[in-house]
Structure formats: structure tokens, C-alpha cells
Amino acid sequence: MAKKNIAVLVSGGGTNLQSLLDSQEKGMFGESRITCVVSSKPGVYALQRAKQHGVDAFVLARGDYPDIAAYSKALADFLSGRQIDLVVLAGFLTIFDEQMFERFPYRILNIHPALIPSFCGKGYYGLHVHEAALAKGVKVSGATVHFVTPECDAGPIVLQKAVEVREDDTPESLQKRIMEQAEWILLPEAVRLFCEDRITVKDGRTYIQ
Ligand code: GAR
């Protein structure tokens, strides 16, 4: 079980990043380490969380690149240059293209705040996901960790957890319960499984030993 270098990509508050930093400090990832945090936006709180834990933090802003292809290449080059083995999207809300998948095939994990294939794909991010779930009136929602492939939110599913939806939920209260009961547990668990080389992908599905 080789030690892995992990990069966590963020765009906002970084509560999922926090769950990963806390899990690492408890020894959950063995010898593997979060060696950098990259934000697609300057000034977000996730950058401070990284610095508080002594992790190198960088901003690679989408607005500094002419198009998605140029941004994706810069991101892939940056991560390759730091010998990254696993890329974790923890509330990373900037789109990149297939260059990232080609450089890191089945080595990018994403957390999505719904039970894929519901409420996912283009436009479904952050609170919009929970607004859509409440508008549909689903009785359960939850979170999904999956590998990133070129098609948005369609890669092999690694872990899922269901969470009850209440009749008096607002998008904010549902988001909070899904984070607390699912996201902050599932994402570190998926990273641990990856670090222990326990996830295999075959025919678009994952198998966990
Ligand atoms: C989380 O709920 C995450 O699942 C979601 O953004 C939030 C980020 O919160 N991601 C997506 O919607 C991706 N499509 P955080 O910055 O506190 O971790």
C-alpha cells in the first residue's frame, strides 16, 4: 500500500475539506497525505482551513484563463507537477474538461449532495441540488461519492448514503443534514478506501474489497 499524495480542490467554505483534514489527523489515511489544496476562487474560507492545518494552499482562478481547455491544462499540469496520486473535489464548482480525466483516470473523486442519478449534472450544485429535491418532494435524498469521468456526475459510484427529507425542510436545513449525516462521513471513507487500494473499477462500476 503505497503512500499517496492527495490534492483537495475547493471553491467555497470547505466543510468537506475540514472533514478530510480532521480524518487525516486521526490517522485515517495511513501514510498518505493531503499535500495541497487548490481553490478556483480567491479569498474563500477553505484556503484558511488549509493554512491552519499547515497544508499548502493555492488559487487557480478560472477567470485567469481564456477558456475551459486552457484552465483544465493548467490545473492538470499543476497537479502533475506536485506528483498528485488522488484528486478530491470537495465542493469544487468549476467545470474542467477531459484533459483532467486523461491525466488522472479513476483518480479523481467527487462528492455530490444527492443520490446520483437524481438531481445531478449541469446546473446541479450547492443549494440548487436541495431546491430541486424539495421541489420534487422526494422523501429521501443523500450524498454520493463517485469517480469523475468526462461526463458530468456520471462516473462510477463509490459510496452513497441516504438521508431523510422532512416536510418542513428548507434548502439550507436539508443541505446541513446531508452534510452532517452523509457528506462528512462518506468523503473521508472513500479517500481511505482509495488510499488502501481497495477500489477497483470494471465496466463502469466500482468494487470494494
Ligand atoms: C457540498 O455540499 C458539496 O457536496 C457540494 O458543494 C458543497 C460544498 O460545501 N458540491 C456540489 O454541489 C458539486 N456538484 P463545502 O465547501 O462546505 O465542502
Image: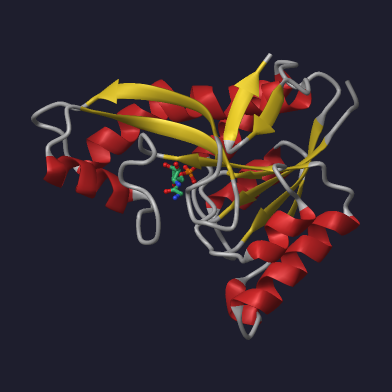
Query: Going by the image, does 127 lie left or right of 57?
Result: left
Instruction: In the rendered view, tell whether residue 70 sits above or below residue 30.
Output: below
Q: Looking at the picture, how far across and down is residue 13, in whole percent?
A: 49, 48
The C terminus, quarter of image: top right
Instruction: In the rendered view, tell whether residue 5 sits above or below residue 192.
Output: below
Q: Residue at x 77, y 20 (%)?
A: 196
Ligand 1 lies in which image quarter?
top left
Q: Looking at the picture, how far across and down is residue 29, in whole percent?
A: 75, 22
Q: Looking at the picture, how far across and down is residue 123, in whole percent?
A: 35, 61
Tell me where residue 41 sits by quadrant: bottom right
How many discs appear? Answer: 0
Q: Nearer the viewer, residue 125 or 205?
A: 205
Q: Nearer the viewer, residue 151 or 192?
A: 151
Q: Residue at x 81, y 18 (%)?
A: 30
Tell me where residue 136 sits by quadrant: top left
The N terminus, quarter of image: top right
Query: Going by the image, does 91 lie left or right of 104?
Result: left
